[in-house]
Image: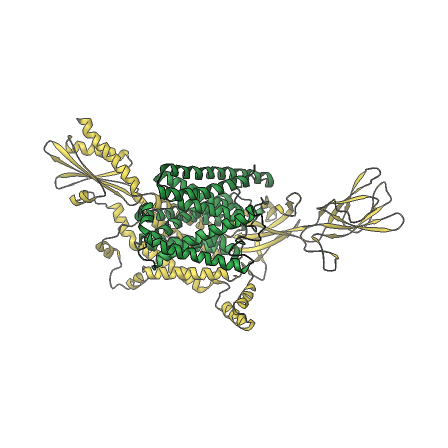
Chain colours: A yellow, B green
Amino acid sequence: MVQETPTPAAADESAAPKNSWYSPLVTFFSSVHVAVITLILLATISIIGTVLQQENIGDVEDNLRLLQQFFGDAGRAQRAYDVAEKIGFFNLYHTWYFYTLLSVLSVSLIVCSLKRLPTTWRIMARPKVELEDAGFKNSPNRRALSLRQPAAEAAAAVSGILAKAGYRVREGERDGARHLFAQKGAYSRLGIYVTHFSIIIIFIGGILGSLYGFKGAMNIVEGETTDEYMPRGGRQTARLPFQVRCDDFNVDYYPGSSRPKDFYSRLTVVDGGREVLKERIEVNSPLKYKGIWFYQSSYGDTGRGLTATIRAVDPKSGAAHDLSFTDRTPQEVPGTQVRVQLQRIYPDFTMDENRQPTSRSNQPRNPVAQVGVLLPDGRTQVAYLFKLRPDLKTARDLPLDLSFTNVESLQYTGLQVVHDPGVWVIWTGCSLMVLGLWFAFFVSHRRVWVRLREEGGATAVALAGNANKNRETFGEEFEKLGDAVQALAEARA
Amino acid sequence: MNSSMLFNTSMVCYLVASVIYIAHLSFRSTKVGWTATGVTALGFVAQTVALGMRWYEKTVLTGFGNIPPLSNMYESMVFWSWSIIMIYLIFERVYRNRSLGVIAAPLGFLAIASISIAPNISQEIEPLVPALQSNWLAAHVMTSFLGYAAFSISFGVSVLYLILAAEKRNEVPYIVGMASLVTMMTLIAATALDFIVQKVAGAAQPHLFAASFASPAAGVKVVSWLAAAAIFALFWYVGTLYHDRIAALFPGMKILDDLSYKMVMVGFPLLTIGIVTGAAWANYAWGTYWSWDPKETWSLITWLIYAAYLHARFTAGWRGKKTAILSVIGFAAVVFTYIGVNFVLSGLHSYA
């Protein structure tokens, strides 16, 4: 569709000159077999890479379990694991052979495209203006009619019709007849080259990113400022050319659930001692400063600076008091002689195997406060207050109605730090690819040839046309053009 | 009235339409043809309204009105079904030809029915995790699934082509086509059986195909496989016997070949845009446009297979059976990328 099958002569012309030093290379890289084998190898490696866990993506240790399942024998599985690790099967997309295949593919793309380009260019730029008689006879779309106008006048009128339909018209002469050649959409033939070229651009973007970019993780505790981050796969921290402060971090949950709806950090960029930028970031909404992007990726609890709020309601008076705790010091509830002591916080409450309360993690998924209620007579009652389930009562006969209304502690925000100068190259390549595909698939190169020959008092007009894709639509258009030319005859009569 | 009732309505419509389209092929009656189109269109309207309602229900629950309901397996499968029917209805209108309804309507039914019945797949509207709260979601999922839908139709047409173009029973293209057809039919039958067991008999099932292939009873399992083998043997045998009569029901072979190719031509740029928007989203959410996650990698493999299809057609001049087989392989990759990866491999893309 995109290429017209080149004539043998044209193919020879565009191939590398014989006997030059690079002709075997051209033959190698333009070979369909080489391209197909490269693609199959790339696909095979990619598939293996989705079956075996890869470094930086999954847990490489899982591969040992997989191999044990496969071999059913721990010793052989271990040996296979070691071999696989040595030949890079756990980091396949970064092995020398994967890169080699990508290089072969790139060169092959370039060579194949360059080899075909001259033929395409000739079809586009140096079209045959004067079609032979056989062309008019055998064209899939053709029309013959007679006009009374002299050839010159008829040619101008037909030319006008074609131009109005969006065609670019050229004129010529052959064997005493006037010839017109009209085309549109010729540039669509370049679409496939743009697409091929865009793949190379995307590769270049990837290379730029890996050569001049960096990625890392950065944890900042609320209120702290830092310029240190941990590069991916690295062991030692690195420094940014400026500092970032986390002013605040928060998680919002869906009502009545422990699913985070949103988590966000308020960040301030400090450059050269000055606050230059303040922004609130969340997942899908990063911060950018001096080409470095900060993505919200995780969060956690430091366990430091804990503040818990317990609401105490005196059932007699109905008076409510919010008690704010930062340590274990008991606080007296005003108007009563009862004191309340915050004994412990379980951020992610659960019961262990001995049915003792414990916390599953540091994430505040199910916060529970263990409080002591110190009665005036010296007795102490212990109660567990569930923040998410205020209706659960674990202690009876308490003199106060207690609920756990809020807990805050110093949290840290987990940021992904990325500098990738290749990203814009990647997007340029992707846009070009989509654009190229559009022109290659949906825009057709349409050509119309016209011969006008004066015979007796009239002008014999022959029309021929073709399109390199979407031929049905062109067939209809050609009929309309033919009808318009026919109308010239009727108008004159 | 809620969205799932309407989804069920559309599911029933597509099943009924499948039967009417088959009747239309056999009787060639215009009235029957219009009935088939009418029922399909009714199902499509119901499904469209249902999608709109689900969007509304989801907005009420999550508070994100800008994000269409395309964020889990159930929702994406429903959208796949919707896209297949939409592309088919456009095709029917443009080409004024109903014969491919026998492919599109069952595909549309299968997609929505299997997901509605699968007990281990949640139909609940779930709150959106922060990673999914992005305007990229709509662009990424819609383009990917419209592409998948085009590939699905190309697959269906290719299967038809492989069966109709066969001269002998023992040629590979014919066997590939028949195997694909019988697999599809068996899946529909197994889904229908699950449906009957769940909805009519009211039995609870732990997973999909529990009434047949995945039954806890070994006997049921064996009978199911034997039945599938018997259907295959029967179709494989009959397919060539009535070859001419069946072939006469469909548009010419050249048209089928061309259609299969046109659908790849529509699907390929859509898949490309789907991959690119996915990369753009990943870059915006995590700072990495490509991380060789299994889903990403498999979408790339799918892309390569269809790229190979296009090159085989343009540069090597492949036509007919050879490209039809490539289309079947491509579709297998689509199904694996979409469904297989979630169940077989692990990765970032755990939503759908």
Q: Is residue B352 left or right of residue B247?
A: right
Q: Nearer the viewer, residue A483 or A6?
A: A483
Numbered disc total: 0
Is residue A337 visible to the viewer in this orientation of the structure? yes
Q: Could you say where residue A58 lies in the image, as x and y percent from the top left?
A: 55, 59
Percent x, y of residue B99: 36, 43
Residue at the spot 42% in from the left edge and 60% down from the top edge: A42
Q: Residue at x 53, y 59 (%)?
A: B219
Judged from this view, the residue extending furthest toward the left is A456
Q: Quadrant of the N terminus of chain B?
A: top right
Q: Nearer the viewer, residue A181 or B102?
A: B102
Residue B131 locus on image (x, y percent): 56, 48
Q: Is residue A404 left or right of residue A492?
A: right
Q: Is residue A205 visible?
A: no
Is A243 situated left or right of A309 in this image?
A: left
In the rendered view, would you say A308 is above or below A111?
above
